[in-house]
Amino acid sequence: MQGRDRAAWFIFGLACSAWSIGQIIWDVFELYLGVVTPFPSYADVGCFGAPYATPNIDRLAKEGRRFTNFHVSSAVCSASRAALMTGCYHNRLGIHGAFGPKSAAGLHPDETTLAELVKQKGYAAGMSGKWHLGDAPEFLPLKQGFDEWYGLPYSNDMWPHHPEAPKGTYPKLPMYQDDKVVDVEVTPEEQKQLTTDYAERAVAFIERNKDRPFFFYLANSMPHVPLYVSDRFEGKSGAGLYGDVIQEIDWGVGRVMEALEKAGVAENTLVIFTSDNGPWLSYGEHSGSAGALREGKGTSWEGGTRVPTRDATWKWLGPSAIASTSMCSASRPQTCTVSP
């Protein structure tokens, strides 16, 4: 890639900002990959105090940086992801909550997304997982800068099997490939494979695009309720279904990192792992933990907006013996600093 412009969103306003930096620095990284997972809460991974092992996510923290005061724009899915994709406060975008099926609203196509930004520099842009920024055709990922997408248009609980919603509230849950529905009704058995499927799509994308700059957005559906885990991870964590789900997500992170190394691009890739909001506490043992932080999803307390975030830039930032404690946010990224 010598002599080519390279784009990276620098330190990370991004995330649930992994995407929203206020300043773009070119000629830093050839490749950029973000893993965003709905409310793995502040204390849900090993390097933030979880009682079960998450070795691959912990490796990101060890070899890159761990951000302990990282805040998302909103404590609700769609609003948080809108900030993540654009770098704007969700209120400025007119997005205040979570979009449901057949919503007339979504992330306006006139907004500039991270995918559209890197495309200007010749990047390939791919995504797997939960979109949740509008399911009408004009709002879907391929109209927002992505070249390809495999995943769900909204949260995996917005389906006929919702445990609390009256029958008929939600339609069948579709699976998309690009702008086409390839499965009109995702079943409970298929939900068990979502985490693995999303990770494998990321791996395939890396293999196909290793010789050019790329950006990939891996947006897991889990651990948003309802929780599902593949058979090989069921009972593995010793911490119930929630722990099993987090360990499968950790496996997916490891799978992606392995693919980057195999492709010979790991040291030129900025990888960020983060969340879109805190735990949904009303779901009890299926909700995760914000640790010592107060409250969770849907609130303005720290438990709702302060999320576990870590990045690996493979030697560029150095090891994370000292974590960054400066406040970082999806919409004010210039406040984010990295400790020496």
Image (spheres, helix red, strand yellow):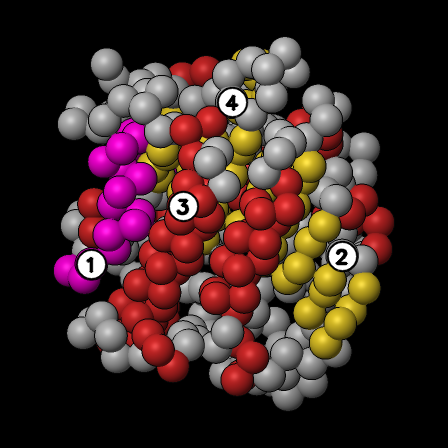
Q: Distance between the residues labelled 4 and 3?
A: 16 Å
**Label 2: how many Cα within 10 Å (few below 14, some 14–19, many 20+):** many
**Label 1: how many Cα within 10 Å (few below 14, some 14–19, many 20+):** some
- The amino acid pointed to by label 2 is Asp
Front residue of 213/321: it is 213
Specify which label sits upstream in the sequence, 2 or 1. 1
- The amino acid pointed to by label 3 is Met
Q: Nearer the viewer, mark 3 or mark 2?
A: 3
Asked whether the beta carbons under mark 3 and mark 2 sit within 8 Å of each other, the answer is no
Q: Which mark is residue 178?
A: 2
Specify which label sits upstream in the sequence, 4 or 3. 4
- The amino acid pointed to by label 1 is Ala
Task: Quickly name the residue at label 4.
Answer: 29
Give how far across and how far down residue 260 sits, in percent: 46, 42
User: Residue at 52% of width from left, 84% of height from top?
Assistant: 189
Q: How far apart are marks 3 and 1 (CA)?
A: 17 Å
Specify which label sits upstream in the sequence, 4 or 2. 4
- The amino acid pointed to by label 4 is Phe
Count of numbered marks: 4
Task: Quickly name the residue at label 1.
Answer: 53
Is residue 283 part of the magenta span, yes or no? Answer: no
User: Residue at 40% of width from left, 46% of height from top?
Assistant: 257
SS of the residue at dot 3?
A: helix
Residue range corresponding to the magenta coloring? 51-71
Q: Nearer the viewer, mark 3 or mark 1?
A: 3
